[in-house]
Image: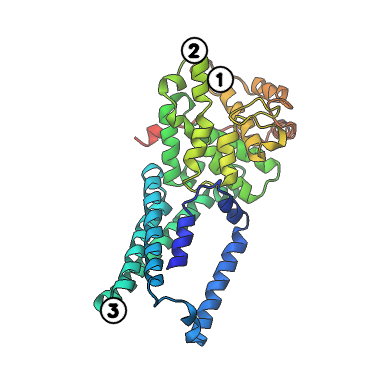
């Protein structure tokens, strides 16, 4: 119970925490290693029942301190995940909230009741329910993570916007709806950027894990605009210097929002760095060259291309040829030259799929 509480507590750390980065990088090894340890310990306990006697669970105040620590970690995790759930409503967050509270109750019942009483039997039922809740949340979240990439690979060619919309979780749809409701002129922009980014990423032979990160990051790359006032987002004229400062904070805002709700390093790089430039003159971190993640360099091209070929509050959409020329001219300054070359090849071969017009997500949700 205590080790479980520790793991759940650690899961509340932001995705950019050094420990989370390490575990994420070696996640397969961590999962296999931890399962192996659990299995071996259980086998040893069955063969040698007295093996756990060295653990001072019957000594005061060690047992009380351990119980208090366990309950505290569960309730702390439940509180953190509840705050996150109020914003994002991911199934995993709800499952951890209820599961952690039930596990805290289980721990309290275990240390305050006598064996073989009704309460003692009851905690077994509570423990089973909490385990099932956590399992449900993990499965639901895992399915939402892989569904976009699965859809991308299963269709003939590239998925339509409708297929891409259906394949993502309701939670991510809500994020996109919230963004598009604030910025009416970029309605559908998130889906189109994700589509362009996925096509370019596949043309550059990125693996399935990076494709998944590209899809998830691209779909909500502008989520930070939720915190930008609507009068700035939809202003038809030129922005003032102060207004420009406000809108240039949206990558940081989106990054800070998403690092606590399950988005990992590759996806977070797309959200924070899609406005960085190859020559270091972008924002918010003034990164240069390969300091910018490959996914962010790819999404930068997709973002600008869609912005140029879409109708905005201050101009009509540009034709493909003119937008492509801007991308080519930006190679080595705004964009990674290798990514631009791959994008040009994709266009010249006639393989770039231009998404069809799609009703804004926020209107479909009404």
Q: Is residue 165 above or below residue 98?
A: above
Which numbered mark, 3 or 1, is in the foreground of this view? 3
How many residues crowd around disc 2 within 10 Å: few (fewer than 14), some, or many (20 or more)?
Answer: few
- The answer to whether residue 142 is seen in the rendering is yes
User: Residue sitting at 39 percent across and 35 percent down?
Assistant: 364
Residue 350 is left or right of residue 34, and the answer is: right
**Alpha carbon of mark 2 to alpha carbon of mark 1: how far?**
16 Å
Farthest-out residue, top: 237
Of the two numbered discs 3 and 1 on the same chain, state the one appearing first in sequence.
Answer: 3
- Residue indicated by mark 2: 237
- The image's mark for residue 317 is 1
Q: CA distance from mark 3 to mark 1?
A: 73 Å
**Quadrant position of residue 25:** bottom right
Q: Secondary structure at mark 3?
A: loop
Q: x, y (%) of residue 173?
A: 44, 41
Residue visible at 35% across and 63% down in the picture: 104
Residue 123 at least partly seen: no
Q: Quadrant of the N terminus?
A: bottom left
Task: Tell me the element at label 2.
Answer: loop
Point out the tag, 3 or 2, that comes first from the N-terminus.
3
Q: Say which element carries label 1.
A: loop
């Amino acid at each position: 119970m205590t080790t479980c509480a520790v793991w759940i507590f650690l899961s509340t750390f932001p995705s950019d925490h050094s420990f989370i980065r390490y575990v994420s990088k070696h996640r397969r090894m961590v999962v296999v290693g931890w399962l192996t340890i659990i299995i071996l310990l259980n086998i040893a306990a069955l063969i040698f029942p007295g093996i756990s006697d060295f653990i001072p669970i019957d000594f005061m105040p060690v047992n009380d301190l351990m119980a208090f620590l366990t309950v505290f970690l569960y309730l702390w995790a439940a509180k953190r995940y509840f705050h996150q759930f109020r914003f994002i409503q991911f199934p995993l967050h709800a499952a951890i909230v209820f599961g952690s509270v039930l596990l805290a109750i289980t721990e309290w019942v275990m240390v305050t009741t006598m064996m073989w009483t009704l309460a003692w039997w009851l905690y077994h039922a509570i423990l089973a329910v909490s385990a099932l809740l956590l399992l449900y949340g993990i499965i639901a979240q895992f399915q939402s993570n892989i569904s976009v990439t699965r859809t991308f690979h299963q269709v003939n060619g590239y998925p339509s916007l409708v297929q891409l919309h259906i394949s993502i979780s309701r939670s991510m749809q809500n994020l996109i709806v919230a963004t598009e409701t604030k910025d009416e002129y970029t309605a559908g922009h998130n889906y189109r950027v994700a589509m362009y980014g996925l096509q370019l990423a596949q043309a550059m032979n990125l693996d399935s894990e990076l494709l998944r990160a590209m899809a998830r990051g691209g779909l909500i790359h502008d989520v930070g605009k939720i915190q930008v006032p609507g009068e700035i987002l939809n202003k038809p004229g030129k922005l003032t210097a102060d207004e420009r400062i406000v809108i240039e904070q949206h990558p940081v805002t989106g990054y800070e929002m998403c690092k606590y709700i399950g988005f990992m390093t590759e996806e977070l790089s797309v959200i924070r760095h899609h406005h960085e430039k190859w020559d270091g003159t972008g924002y918010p971190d003034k990164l240069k060259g390969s300091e910018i993640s490959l996914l962010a360099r790819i999404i930068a091209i997709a973002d600008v291309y869609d912005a140029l070929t879409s109708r905005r509050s201050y101009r009509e959409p540009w034709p493909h040829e003119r937008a492509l020329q801007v991308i080519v001219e930006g190679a080595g300054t705004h964009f990674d030259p290798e990514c631009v070359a791959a994008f040009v090849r994709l266009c010249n071969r006639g393989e770039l799929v231009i998404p069809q017009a799609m009703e804004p997500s926020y209107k479909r949700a009404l």
